[in-house]
Amino acid sequence: MQRSAAATDTDVLILGGGLAGLTLAIQLLRRDPGLQVTVLERRAHPVREAAHKVGESTVEIGAHYFADVLGLRAHLDDEQIRKFGFRFFFSEGREDIDACTELGVSRLLPTPSWQIDRGRFENFLGERARALGADFRDGAVVRSIEMAETGNDAPHRVGFERGGTAATLVARWVVDASGRAGLLKRKLGLAEANDHDANAVWWRVEGHVDPNAWSTDPAWLRRCTPPDRWRSTNHMCGPGYWFWLIPLASGSHSLGIVCDAKMHPLETMNTHERAMAWLREHQPAVASALQAHALQDFLFLRGFSYGCREVFSADRWALTGEAGLFLDPFYSPGSDFIAIANTYVCDLVEKDRAGKAFAPYAGIYQQLYFSFYENTMTLYQDQYPLFGDERVMPIKVIWDYTFYWALLAPLFFGGRLTDLAMLGRLRGELAAGSALNRAMQPLLHDWGARNAGAAPPAARLLDQFRIDWFHEMNRALGDRLEDDAFAARIAGNVARMRWLAAEILARARGDHPGLDGHGLDALLDDGPGIPASLAALWYADAA
């Protein structure tokens, strides 16, 4: 690859050496070992394990990015915790967790994901980046950013201080990976609010919190094989909120309350004492279990979700990770969007290095990235009121997973995010899948609203592992397909979504005749159905 003719100290300067910045450095250097990559990180390395950061649970895209795109599977298997899927307990106000409806898998699904101890992982990433040739400067505080004028081929200049010494770096590309500090976002005025008003508090305790210790019922303990509920991302759900429990490989457990700001004001939980009092009211079994675990730290965050007006620029700058936008932690999409943004940044840098016209791609990739953000946001926005509904919420989770595994996840696993020819070929299918989801989310919201005060269904394990097609969609993410087979796979996935949507609509109207379908009826057809067998989810536990 040809190098830029402009005089620079580095080809790519990354502001921030956390998860987004270090993975970007590794990805860039794996694709082009001759690239000059510099990372400026404010914190000194190594950082402590169980670092106080959100984003500890991975799902399929992020897990595949870390394990296979970056080649870090051995570290994940040996030094992190294999995740036992998502698990949901509808346990508002309950002490008897074993008598609550539980949604999850009884056995591991084929495509792996991991629980990430962020401190341990970022220390490893720093070492890996340096081994690949990155100039990783920890303990460096950015003091100034001078961006080249729009349309100017001149490089950018960043001033920083390290060890009491001031210095300046001249870079062809600058990528902001500084997290919520948003160095470039603030300088360029790119901040953009969204309508998802939610807050979070989170803390860590010593030792692992094991849900299996909450019951002595042999039948309940036998539901999972092996009985490793503690390795799941456990969600304790109620109206307007969910509470997470995520184990960390260093021996700590991450805990957090995430809530609709209107239904559960932040002021009721913004200290550890208030958070524990809140738990004693809403999740008393968890509150009791935590008494045996020493507190390590505590933080809160108001209005954690936000957008951004621009993330990829033809003027050779970009934003990745939380420096750009952030959705909601419910389905752990943070590492997914790091993977997607970093992949687009790498492609833009690669095209520039090769002397190709990359500027049009910056706009196209940004449009795609924002569309992924907007479609994923529908899963969260205005949906928190139904989180405690144990009739609708399990069906929503199945739908949301299906939507994710049908479209975005195959595009990433198949290396098709930058394949504009394939994306153009799939335009109709992608639009159809997105339209189904946009109609489904308000239907689920209305269904839950009409259920207010209704008796819940009998408590049981709703085992996602028993849904054959669901299991197969997860497995199929790893298939390597040629173009025609890949296009056929996406078309089949959308057909499955359409069949599932018809089943969900029928179930909702079975509970509430005349329920508004929000345009869903017009998106369905009378073609041959794909055996979704959603009823397999609702089975009674054997004695």
Image: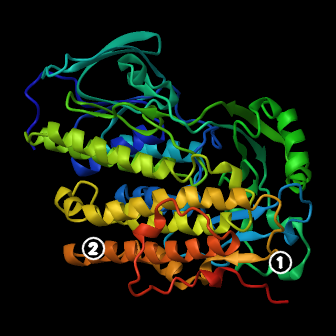
* Side of 181 where 31 appears, left or right: left
Q: Amino acid at mark 2?
A: Phe
Is 149 in front, or is 101? Answer: 101
Q: Residue 246: in sight, yes or no?
A: no
Scheme of colours in the image = rainbow
Report the residue at 43% width, 46% height from top. 374
Mark linked to residue 220: 1
Callout 1: 10 Å neighbours few (<14), some, many (20+)? some
Q: Amino acid at mark 1?
A: Trp
Q: First in sequence, mark 1 or 2: give its number.
A: 1
Tally the numbered discs: 2
Instruction: Please determine whether, in this image, residue 132 is positioned above or below residue 439.
Output: above
Report the residue at 24% width, 51% height from top. 31
Is 225 in front, or is 45? Answer: 225
Instruction: Please determine whether, in this image, residue 95 is positioned above or below residue 472.
Output: above
Q: Residue 38: in sight, yes or no?
A: yes
- Measuring from the top left, give residue 167's x and y in whole percent: 34, 13
Mark linked to residue 486: 2
* Side of 98 where 110 appears, left or right: left
